[in-house]
Amino acid sequence: MAGSALRRLMAEYKQLTLNPPEGIIAGPINEENFFEWEALITGPEGTCFEGGVFPAKLTFPPDYPLSPPKMQFTCDIFHPNIYSDGRVCISILHAPGDDPMGYESSAERWSPVQSVEKILLSVISMLAEPNDESGANVDAAKMWREDRNQFNEIAEKLVRKTLGIP
Amino acid sequence: MVNLEAKHFFNYNRFPCNEKAVFTIIYAPIGFILMVLRSILALFIVICAQVLPESQSSHYLVHNLLSFCFGINVIVENVNQNKNSKIYVGNYLSLFDHLAISKAFGFVLPLNNTPLRSLPGLGIINFGSVCTDDFKNNLEAVKSKNVSLYLCPEELPTNGKGILKFNTKYFEFFDEIQPICVTVKRPLLDISVSTISSTCWNDIIYFMYSPCTIYTIKILPALEKKNLSGEEFASIVRDNIATELKIEASSLSASDLLEWSKRHMLEEKRRMQERARIHSGGSQISNPELERMASLVKAVFPNIPIVAIYSDLAITRNIDTTITNILDGRVRYMPETQRSTPSPSASQSVTPPAMKTSNIPASSTNFTQFNTAAMSFGKNANERTKSFKERKEQLIAAARRRYIEKHNLDIPL
């Protein structure tokens, strides 16, 4: 199946190169290994992450698209649904039945009809609207609920950091 | 001894698939004529039975004649063991086991369901379910008339590979039982008595079509219940029959088998429909290799109908090419709604991403709106990686510029 995984990844790469959604770039870091991608995601407008360009690493399994890829931000990020080491906790990255946190609906799960583009769009909407029931980053979830101003300040700092602005 | 599963208790083919198949073809016209003659005779007998007096001897005569019509021959072993008990208990093999028993031991009344039950004039009565009072009353009435009974406590005919769990309720009512072992075969042609998909009418027709059906009945020593419970008694009877027949006493019951066969038939039906759909889709004749490849592609694109995948595979003969064709939107299909996995997200995306936007021209090197599209997709890895890097840098630079402009920062762009 590695052959069809490569085919599919190549097709998705082509698609994302020619017709990417706004503010998104994704592709293999080095084509020698097609299963390791880098993605840049622009923080959605009107949110505390507005304007930031967040880099993340996507790791695809050999049986992609039957199994979902893994996604991890490589920059500093503070968000209720992202672990402090950058791993993204979102339902589209989990196959049905595999539910580490136990509260995800079976909707929006990984299936082979999903795609890198869908994952990245889901992550953008996750940046805009955190699911504060998820405890991937408890501190962030708590702050998001209780002290939105401080959360926004931290987010602002992170945005500046990704842009190289002091 | 092998552990029998539900699937082992059924026959799947009416006719043998071995060298005897030739005989079957040669025999067909003879069988057909035999069937017609026998059914006319059977009809005649059933009509005559209506005018005969209601007595055991006339019923015995009618049953014997019907056995003749159905080509039933009986071989009895261990006749000296027969104590002329009032209740025979045997393993269940066919619709007409009781006719064979009648033929061997004089008129017996089947306690189990039989297709002859609905015919008046044969002396067969409906006992009803074993748990009901009706059953008890009917049984008392019959016992007082001194009629022999035949019971198949398995309650479901099998192919005789094993013996099912007994319904132990029956054993509450009897103190002495004559166990018998029944085997059935059709010599020469090996036509199955029953198959998993057959109805009772099919089976009757094949009784008449086959040259003859030979029942071998082996009488086992009579057993007395003494002070055993019904359940214990049942298990002793069952073990005796199973040992004598050298078959496994299975832990499955009739309801397990019914359940399994129902599921099996549904599965079979679904498979037939799928195959019919593939054929009506104008594809080629079924090809296991193509079907295997189609199922792999189907695993990647659950929402794309198998027919569409199949017809593309028939052209490409290559999984990867077909996957690319689907992603590039070269495969036309009506999206399929998914029922098996409850995933609304999957139904939103009936078209793979490549198809949605592929007709929008990829242009724009304008980065002010965060558009990151490339002019073209490079022909080789170097070109693509270079373009990828450039676009990343451009995106970050554009975002930075925007941020600085928006916040009126005093930093060089």
Image (cartoon, coloured by chain):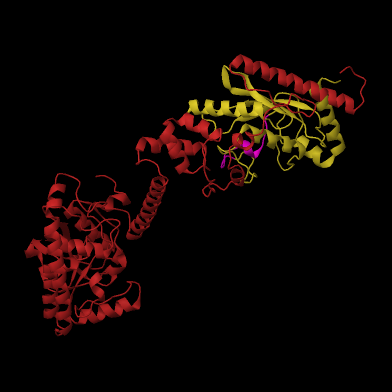
- Tell me residue B295's x, y (percent): 44, 38
Q: Is residue B214 in sight in this rendering?
A: no
Asked if residue B165 lies left or right of residue A58, the reply is left
Residue nearer the viewer, A123 or B153: A123
* Image position of B39 with respect to A77: above or below: below
Q: What shade does chain A have?
A: yellow
* Image position of B157 with respect to B397: above or below: below
Q: What shade does chain B have?
A: red
**Residue A54: in magenta span:** no
Q: Residue at x 58, y 16 (%)?
A: B380
- Tell me residue B8's x, y (percent): 28, 50
Residue nearer the viewer, B396 or B9: B396
Asked if residue B368 lies left or right of residue B87, the reply is right
Q: Quadrant of residue A136?
A: top right
Extent of the magenta region? A87-98
Residue nearer the viewer, A76 or B277: B277
Q: Quadrant of residue A129?
A: top right
Q: Residue at x 63, y 34 (%)?
A: B359
- Tell me residue B14's x, y (percent): 22, 54
Asked if residue B292 lies left or right of residue B79, the reply is right
